[in-house]
Image (tube, helix red, strand yellow):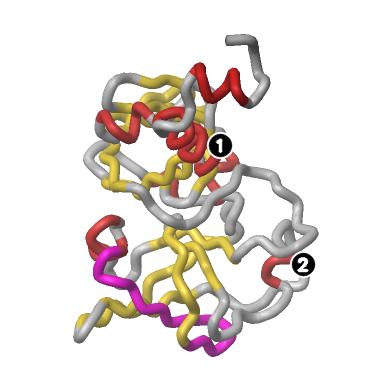
Amino acid sequence: MFTGLIQRIGTVRRVSRGAGLVLEIECGAPDAGGACAGAWAKPLSEGESVAVNGVCLTVVKCDGSRFTADVLRETEERTGLGGLVPGEKVNLERALRAGDAMGGHIVQGHVDRRGTVVAKEPRGRDFRLRIQCGRVFAAGCLLKGSVAVNGVSLTISDLGEDWLAVDVIPTTARETTIGTLRAGDEVNLEGDVLGKYAAKAAAGPGLTEEALARAGFFDA
């Protein structure tokens, strides 16, 4: 599980295609200081989870400053990882640990779909991204709710039938790859998991007025 608060920007060093997609990513050496000292005070370990542009991947091999991860075919098809090229920058977040501060929102690293940036509008020091996300994804979103865009926890500032908009502050633009996005770029989108469960429960056949009355929520 992750929070959508990006800790480092990594660099893709190698993209291999054989039986499957393999990524090698430069993540930098452990750092005892800085804002993310707790998360990156120790090197990565084989088997641990890292979110790469919002996609939860397992570290297969690491040497302290680089790590290698396999990408499932389903993951490649659903996300934008298959389009990464050497030299490209990616958002990195290590998995949440017990006792860590929950500063963003619950992010699973399970991307729902890819979206497309259709507009980037300056708004004073900030800017707004309008993202085409499809009707199904938009229907599961909530104005002022949370969404993960390339792994970054953002608040939905506007919402349409098949699109959403998020406002980005200078710090987020500087500390993540969100600041480099332009119209036409694809992004990984993950909806709020709490909203997904609520929608599933509301749509389920068991949640009816009769069922609620039997449970004592109100008189039939």
Taking 36 as reference, is 116 left or right? left
Residue range corresponding to the magenta coloring = 61-74
Under mark 1, the amino acid is Pro
Q: Does the magenta stretch include residue 64?
A: yes
Q: In which quarter of the image is the C terminus?
A: top right
Q: Are marks 1 and 2 in contact (CB under 8 Å)?
A: no
Q: Label 1: which residue?
A: 170
Neighbor class of circle 2 (other Cα within 10 Å; few <14, some 14-19, many 20+) is few
Residue at 26% x, 36% y is: 183
Taking 70 as reference, is 146 left or right? right
> Which label's residue is closer to the chain start, 1 or 2?
2
Q: Work out whether residue 72 or residue 62 is closer to the camera in this orientation and state it.
A: 72
Under mark 2, the amino acid is Gly
Residue at 27% x, 26% y is: 162
Residue 118 shows up from this direction: no
Height in image: 120 above or below 87?
A: above
- Residue found at the very far left of the displayed protein: 18
Residue 68 in which image quadrant: bottom left
Height in image: 32 above or below 89?
A: below
Neighbor class of circle 1 (other Cα within 10 Å; few <14, some 14-19, many 20+) is few
Taking 109 as reference, is 75 left or right? left
**Where residue 95 sits in the image (x, y, percent)?**
61, 64
Q: In which quarter of the image is the N terminus?
A: bottom right
Residue 69 shows up from this direction: yes
Q: Label 2: which residue?
A: 33
Residue at 54% x, 82% y is: 47
Q: Which secondary structure, mark 2?
A: loop
Alpha carbon of mark 1 to alpha carbon of mark 2: how far?
22 Å
**Where residue 18 sits in the image (x, y, percent)?**
20, 85
Q: Does the magenta stretch include residue 71?
A: yes
Count the numbered circles shown: 2
